[in-house]
Amino acid sequence: MSARLIIMGPQGSGKGTQAARLAERLGVPAISTGDIFRANVKGGTELGNQAKAIMDAGDLVPDSLTNAMVRDRLAEADTAEGFILDGYPRNAAQVEALDAVLAERGVTLDAVVELSADRDELLARLARRAVVEGRADDTEEAISRRLAIYAEQTAPLTDAYAERGLLVAVDGIGDVDDVTERLMAALASRVG
Ligand code: ADP
């Protein structure tokens, strides 16, 4: 079984939750750039110190740092049979950097999943998450900044992946288990 996937979707679309579930089902690691950055902030590493203020404002960490971090992560042994990238790539330069890393490793993507949800649902979920998780970047300003960056820089990336025949669109509204089943069904012909 091999599964090399990207999961895309705006903040609140349930992307992180579904990435973890798909990873479990497919037997490959879910790699969340946001989680890796947060772990670095918590651990007080140099990378974490560089990223913290940027993340709190809802801005993107510079590509140089992000691309190097992903390159290192994809060199780890647990990605031999695949991975699910959650939160990366987020702009055109990151798409190029990822293409280069995969080409060096002699592998290709199997699919890019786009999880959709309407804006009212996204905002409702984010408001709930802000209460439950207490993330430093779940302030109103940082959330709207992240949604704006998603719309401007990240959503357009689906066009490029659609042209490559990799895009799979899945409705992210509904019960968490139902969405997982929808994802598994949509990916069935692409992984394995
Ligand atoms: P969300 O999807 O709610 O924005 P993430 O956990 O994916 O949350 O990301 C949190 C923050 O981590 C981002 O706002 C950004 O500052 C940083 N980050 C995560 N992934 C990337 C990336 N690919 N490029 C640049 N910054 C990133």
Image (tube, rainbow, N blue to C red):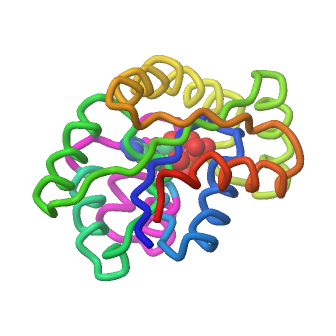
Q: Is residue 78 visible?
A: yes
Q: Residue at x 36, y 73 (%)?
A: 81
Membership of 59 in magenta stretch: yes
From this view, report whether residue 102 is shown above or below residue 96: below
Residue 57 located within the stretch drawn in magenta: yes
Q: Who's the residue at 46% across and 65% down the image?
A: 192
Would you place residue 38 above or below residue 130 in this image?
below
Judged from this view, the residue extending furthest toward the left is 104
Residue closer to the observer: 192 or 100: 192
Q: What number of labels is visible?
A: 0
167 or 44: nearer the viewer: 167
Is residue 11 rendered to the left or right of residue 179?
left
Percent position of residue 70, x then y: 30, 59
155 or 65: which is nearer to us?
Answer: 155
Residue drawn at 73 percent across, 34 percent down: 171
Apparent side of residue 66 relative to residue 31 in the rendered image (left or right): left
Where residue 38 appears, x then y in whole percent? 51, 62
From the image, give the main secondary structure of the stretch colored magenta. helix
Image quadrant in which the N terminus is located: bottom left
Q: Residue 146: horizontal and vertical position, in percent?
A: 56, 31
Report whether 41 appears left or right of 46: right
14 is higher (above) or lower (below) than 118: below
Q: Residue furthest bottom?
A: 77
Write down the region rendered in magenta: 35-64
- Picture residue at 83% right of the left edge, 23% below the top: 120
Looking at the image, which is closer to me, 62 or 150?
Answer: 150
